[in-house]
């Protein structure tokens, strides 16, 4: 039986690949079709996380943990209509409009392909078999483990020549991937030498480049600065030195030179993802899929291309395989799908390039941003700011806090451009004693105020007596104290007289109960951060109101110290915080605002 009437036509949009391009397309489409139940959006990736590819060298060089380059896709698309699917797509049936994996098929009306790139070996013999690459988190972890294993083996090796081979590391390629990697290795070397009892002079690092200069994307001034810095941290740069053969224990250069090594990391170039190249679409060059200016494929109107797997000539030049391209192609593809669904005009893609930043280890960077050259501290600062900006857009403030933790608070061996100044840790149980002490002081102070009659409506101490000019509270509570300020600032007096005076008693009662509450919370170690923050705030208030003498600084600075996790040891926060995190993670608002933690603290 057929039912008469208008059938609801659901449009299925599928995005393949959760890289920079796919994620941005997904976010834009989800925002647009938030309340449109006729549109379904699915994002398929073979990983459950979005990889911050631009930070992979930090994992390979053991600067940060792998967690810092993974953002859960569930988190990115929490509280959106995007259905995240974990699968590896091997084929696409464009006629039947279906993506095919080993276990499933997924139908679509619109498809966005953003499968990224992979290393290009240019037919150099032995690279694939004997070399390492740096184009995925797995690659980065393999490089890291291999380097550690080389130091370990070398530390036991007695034969000088073999030991030298093991301690010689070659990065092939001097684009940003290669240079960023070799910069990290130069930094990590010190720690490895210390751990394995090896003299630093035994370790040799090379960056080998076929072209005449390193970082050709930058201007000559910045290239010179990068070279000088790399040399100063012990990197040997060989330019005009194409590698023609990679063996298990050596590499051979075009001029016949041979470098004995067990480690070659190949970063010489990229090409489009091989699986996508075999989907059967019209190809451009370097294994990238040809697109129209609207980012539609040449063969199917409903198939769009984004990011590194796209071949498109913008102003006669192929669009570069960088993050900005991926993000902007993602946005244009999403815009054009929306236009198609709404019957509006599509737009042509135009890259709006802002620049590039290259870090050489954790302390130095060179950058060309909007035509401005920067180096050193400023360039590094810009790199962090740009990363934070990206993370905020993708996964909110919580992701930014995680980044700050990984890059500054949790750094190993002072590997940050501000050194290890904010990374030093002290056992929080040492703070437990201070916490209880400060808590007792606040409790006694609050109880004293109760005894002095602060909870009686007829006694108002917090408003200054206009005739005496001095704070009555000061007289009542701090007979022997010489206030830091002889008079509160005029604005404070105005605020108290006009805003607080009509509600003086409730405010006064709150101050007293606040002191008692802070005291009890600190003694118990419950909500310690908030209690310590309130303690600092009350100190500031007492100073401004000309009630406090210099003794208050003890409280003030103790409060700051207690914010650093003083409740996690010998306090109730140890139990309450993990429970609260779990509860919070499940709330809708946490997911909607991204203000949730991926991993609730696991307690044994
Ligand atoms: C070490 C390193 C440093 C870099 N530094 C910079 C830099 O400083 N600045 C800059 O602009 N660029 C940099 N890049 C380049 C930049 O990372 C890429 O241009 C960018 O990642 C491209 O984004 P994308 O969305 O096209 O693909 P990707 O980010 O590569 O994502 C592709 C996604 O597709 C998924 N996928 C692929 N095939 C399949 C399949 N068959 N089935 C399911 N899922 C699939 C993958 O799992 C992946 O999640 C760097 C790259 C590296 C490796």
Image (spheres, rainbow, N blue to C red):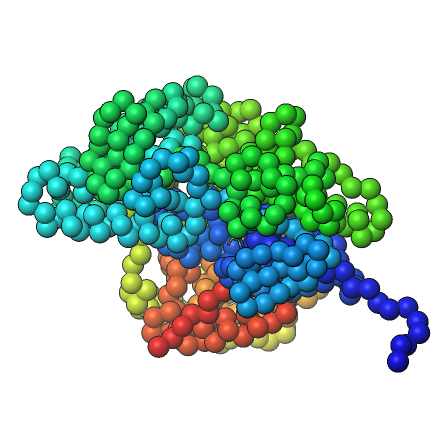
**Residue at image point 32% right, 46% down:** 129
Residue 187, quarter of picture: top left
Residue 14: image location, x then y, percent: 66, 57
Going 53% across and 60% down the picture, which residue do you hit?
A: 88
Q: Quadrant of residue 248?
A: top left
Screen quadrant of the C terminus: bottom left
Q: Does residue 249 appear in this view?
A: yes
Q: Position of residue 578 (x, y in %)?
A: 45, 73
Frontmost residue, 130 versus 344: 130
On the rendered structure, is 232 left or right of 32? left
**Among all residues in the image, which is located at the extreme bottom?**
1
Residue 559 coordinates in the image, percent (x, y): 42, 60
> Which one is nearer the viewer's eye here, 12 or 587?
12
Q: Is residue 338 above or below residue 163?
A: below
Nearest the viewer among 229 and 523 is 229
Instruction: Report the residue that reaches farthest toward the right.
Output: 4
- When asked about the image quadrant of residue 108, the answer is bottom right
Residue 448 in the image, given as x and y percentages of width and height? 46, 73
40 lies above or below 237: below
Q: Is residue 359 visible?
A: no
Residue at point 55% right, 68% down? 103
Q: From what the image shows, is residue 456 above or below residue 43? A: below
The residue depicted at 72 percent of the width and 39 percent of the height is 294
Q: Is residue 88 left or right of residue 433?
A: right
């Amino acid at each position: 039986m057929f039912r008469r009437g208008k059938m609801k036509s659901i449009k299925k949009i599928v995005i393949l690949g959760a890289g920079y391009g796919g994620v941005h397309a997904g976010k834009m489409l989800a925002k647009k079709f938030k309340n449109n139940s006729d549109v379904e959006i699915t994002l398929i990736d073979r990983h459950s996380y979005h990889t911050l590819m631009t930070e992979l060298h930090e994992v390979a060089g053991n600067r940060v943990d792998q967690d810092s380059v993974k953002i859960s896709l569930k988190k990115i698309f929490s509280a959106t209509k995007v259905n995240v699917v974990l699968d590896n797509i091997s084929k696409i049936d464009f006629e039947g409009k279906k993506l095919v994996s080993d276990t499933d098929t997924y139908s679509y009306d619109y498809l966005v392909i953003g499968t990224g790139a992979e290393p290009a070996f240019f037919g150099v013999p032995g690279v694939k078999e004997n070399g390492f690459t740096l184009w995925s988190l797995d690659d980065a972890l393999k490089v890291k483990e291999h380097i550690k294993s080389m130091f370990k083996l070398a530390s036991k090796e007695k034969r000088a020549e073999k030991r030298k081979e093991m301690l010689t590391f070659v990065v092939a390629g001097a684009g940003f991937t290669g240079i960023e990697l070799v910069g990290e290795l130069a930094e990590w070397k010190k720690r490895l030498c210390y751990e394995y009892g090896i003299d630093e002079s035994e370790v040799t690092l090379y960056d080998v480049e076929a072209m005449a200069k390193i970082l050709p994307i930058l201007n000559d001034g910045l290239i010179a600065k990068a070279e000088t810095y790399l040399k100063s941290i012990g990197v040997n740069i060989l330019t005009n030195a194409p590698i023609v053969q990679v063996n298990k224990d050596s590499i051979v250069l075009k001029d016949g030179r041979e470098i004995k090594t067990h480690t070659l990391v190949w970063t010489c170039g990229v090409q489009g993802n091989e699986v996508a190249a075999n989907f059967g679409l019209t190809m451009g060059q370097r294994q990238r899929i040809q697109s129209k200016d609207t980012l539609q494929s040449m063969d199917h109107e409903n198939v769009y291309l984004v990011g590194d797997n796209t071949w498109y000539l913008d102003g006669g030049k192929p669009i570069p395989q960088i993050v900005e391209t991926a993000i902007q192609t993602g946005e244009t593809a999403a815009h054009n799908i929306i236009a198609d669904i709404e019957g509006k005009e599509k737009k042509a893609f135009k890259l709006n390039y802002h620049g590039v930043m290259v870090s050489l280890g954790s302390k130095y960077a060179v950058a060309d941003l909007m035509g401005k050259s920067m180096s050193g501290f400023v360039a590094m600062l810009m790199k962090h700011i740009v990363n934070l900006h990206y993370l905020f857009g993708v996964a909110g403030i919580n992701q930014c806090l995680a980044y700050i933790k990984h890059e500054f608070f949790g750094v190993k061996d002072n590997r940050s451009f501000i050194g290890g100044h904010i990374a030093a840790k002290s056992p929080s149980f040492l703070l437990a004693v201070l916490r209880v002490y400060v808590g007792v002081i606040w409790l006694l102070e609050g109880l004293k105020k109760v005894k002095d009659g602060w909870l009686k409506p007829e006694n108002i101490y917090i408003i200054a007596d206009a005739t005496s000019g001095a704070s009555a509270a000061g007289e009542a509570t701090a007979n022997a104290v010489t206030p830091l300020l002889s008079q509160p600032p005029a604005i404070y007096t105005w605020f108290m007289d006009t805003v607080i005076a009509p509600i003086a008693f409730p405010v006064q009662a709150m101050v007293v109960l606040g002191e008692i509450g802070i005291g009890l919370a600190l003694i118990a170690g419950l909500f310690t951060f908030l209690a310590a923050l309130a303690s600092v705030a009350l100190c500031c208030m007492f100073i401004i109101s000309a009630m406090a003498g210099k003794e208050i600084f003890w409280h003030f600075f103790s409060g700051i110290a207690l914010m650093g996790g003083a409740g996690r040891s010998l306090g109730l926060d140890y139990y309450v915080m993990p429970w609260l995190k779990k509860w919070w993670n499940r709330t809708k608002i946490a997911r909607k605002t991204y203000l949730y933690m991926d991993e609730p603290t696991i307690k044994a």
